[in-house]
């Protein structure tokens, strides 16, 4: 159980939902720190695509789990990689935090995922990146809903409006 001072405001949701962009702005608006688990992994271990390619997804998930523990202990605003909620220990940790689920409509996500090379899960070649995104989101939706206290759809409107809505709720 995390102490109240260290409690984090955590953003979860699928790739392309805007977790990092919104998280950075939200932290600024709330006058607190921002941490992103993908960035923590990259800083310590190098690019995510290379980790998947050289060591496999399970290795990445173990590094991601360590980054989640680290980020939650720091508090502030924390953005989790889209697959972090697959880890049962992470889901248990999130029960002590305020958790915001960011969703996005498929018609919008296609534009946001332009830099697909950074997201190895969408580039496995067996189906279109968007079809793959949809399938992964459908699989994970129950996990996102299990950990989330509130949901915001980021499909339309300026990011600032969503940031303010989250800050008002928090
Ligand atoms: C992943 C999402 C990515 C990153 C990795 C795997 C996933 O993070 O952690 O490529 O499994 O959904 P973003 O959600 O920040 O793109």
Image (spheres, grey):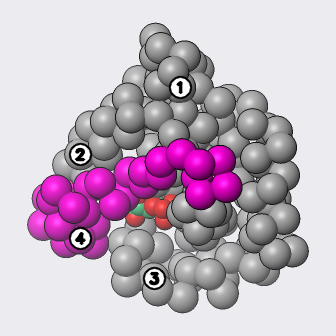
137 versus 112 height, above or below: above
Q: Secondary structure under badge 3?
A: helix
State which mark lies toward you, 4 or 1: 1
Q: Which residue is mark 4?
A: 47
Disc 2 residue crowd, few under 14, some 14–19, many 20+, Cα 10 Å:
some
The tag earlier along the polypeptide, 1 or 3, is 1
- Magenta segment range? 27-56
Q: Secondary structure under badge 1?
A: loop
Q: Which residue is mark 1?
A: 7
State which mark lies toward you, 1 or 3: 1
Q: Which residue is mark 2?
A: 63
167 versus 43 height, above or below: above
User: Cα distance, mark 2 to mark 1?
Assistant: 22 Å
Q: In which of the image's four quarters is ligand 1 placed? A: bottom left
User: Cα distance, mark 4 to mark 1?
Assistant: 28 Å
Q: Is residue 55 magenta?
A: yes
Q: Quadrant of the C terminus?
A: top right
């Amino acid at each position: 159980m995390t102490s109240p001072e260290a409690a984090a405001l955590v953003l979860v949701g699928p790739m392309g939902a805007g977790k990092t962009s919104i998280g950075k702005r939200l932290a600024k608006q709330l006058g607190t720190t921002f941490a992103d688990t993908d960035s923590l992994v990259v800083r310590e271990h190098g690019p995510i695509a290379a980790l998947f390619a050289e060591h496999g997804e399970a290795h990445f998930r173990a590094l991601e789990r360590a980054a989640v523990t680290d980020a939650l202990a720091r508090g502030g605003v924390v953005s989790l990689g889209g697959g972090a909620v697959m880890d049962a220990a992470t889901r248990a940790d999130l029960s002590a935090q305020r958790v915001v689920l960011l969703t996005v409509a498929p018609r919008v996500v296609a534009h946001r995922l332009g830099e697909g090379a950074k997201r190895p899960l969408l580039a496995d070649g067996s189906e279109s990146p968007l079809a793959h995104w949809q399938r992964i989101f459908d699989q994970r939706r129950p996990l996102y809903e299990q950990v989330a206290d509130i949901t915001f759809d980021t499909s339309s409107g300026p990011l600032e409006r969503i940031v303010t809505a989250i800050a008002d709720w928090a």
